[in-house]
Image (spheres, rainbow, N blue to C red):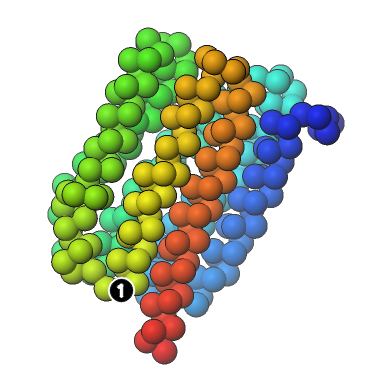
Amino acid sequence: MLDPNDYVGVTFWIISAAMVAATYFFTVERDRAEGKWKTSLTVAAMVTGIAAIHYFYMRGVWIETNDSPLVFRYVDWLLTVPLQIVEFYLILAAIAVVRAALFWKLMIASLVMLIFGYLGELGAMNYWLAFLIGMAGWGYIIYEIFAGEASQISASQGTEASKTAFNALRIIVTFGWAIYPIGYVAEPLFGVEALNIVYNLADFVNKIAFGVVIWAAATSSSTAKA
């Protein structure tokens, strides 16, 4: 049973339901989008759907053990974060010819961020060294979407809808993803409770808001051409 005073467990329950609801919403709304945006909404639904499945398991681990569901958490991220990188690529590929190298640079940077975060939390390497390497991967993604090739393609060839989506997504990646390092730093200072509350908040903001941005661009693009 879920203890009403278990605030971490409550956040797991809330976000489990929210991810299911978001998945249903993005799937249903896919019919409102035009061809090039349908795939983006499908990916958004995949992100929240995968997260929902993992949150059911993470919720159970927390309630039964009161310990951080580390493996489930990072398996979730190893699937959903690259899919979010795919969203950037899909937006750009819909408006221009985009080099595959750009996709792989962003993908590798996201994997560096996740793999070293996992190694640090697992205790397989120095906690703070892993944190710095993971932050470097995140920093490269921020550079690429604000000043690199991805940013240049969006600025020079983007439509109004794609620019709106791209700009909103990079704000989420910058400020929304910044919540994750706060959680990482919080664990040695405040314990696993703080870590999981922060991580759960970050997933709620980033996975669902990420999809909402895609949905807003997809439906506005379709309305503009109606």
Q: Residue at x 27, y 68 (%)?
A: 94
- In this view of the protein, can residue 57 be seen by the observer? yes
User: Residue 184: percent from the left, percent from the top?
Assistant: 48, 24
Asked if residue 151 lies left or right of residue 213, the reply is left
Give the image location of residue 224, x and y in percent: 39, 84
Q: Is residue 185 left or right of residue 112?
A: right
Give the residue number, with chain letter if any, for mark 1: 160
Q: Is residue 103 above or below residue 119?
A: below
Q: Say which residue appears at 32% left-offset and 22% top-offset.
A: 132
Residue 98, image x and y in percent? 17, 59
Secondary element type, mark 1? helix
Place of residue 76 in the rendered image (x, y in percent of width and height, measured from the top left): 50, 37
For the C terminus, give its image quadrant.
Answer: bottom left
State the residue at coordinates (68%, 38%): 11
Q: Is residue 151 above or below residue 226?
A: above
In the figure, residue 129 lies in which quadrant? top left
Image quadrant occupied by the N terminus:
top right
Q: Which one is in front, 98 or 190? A: 190
Q: In the figure, 58 relative to 214: above or below?
A: above
Q: Residues within 10 Å of mark 1 (few under 14, many from 20)?
A: few
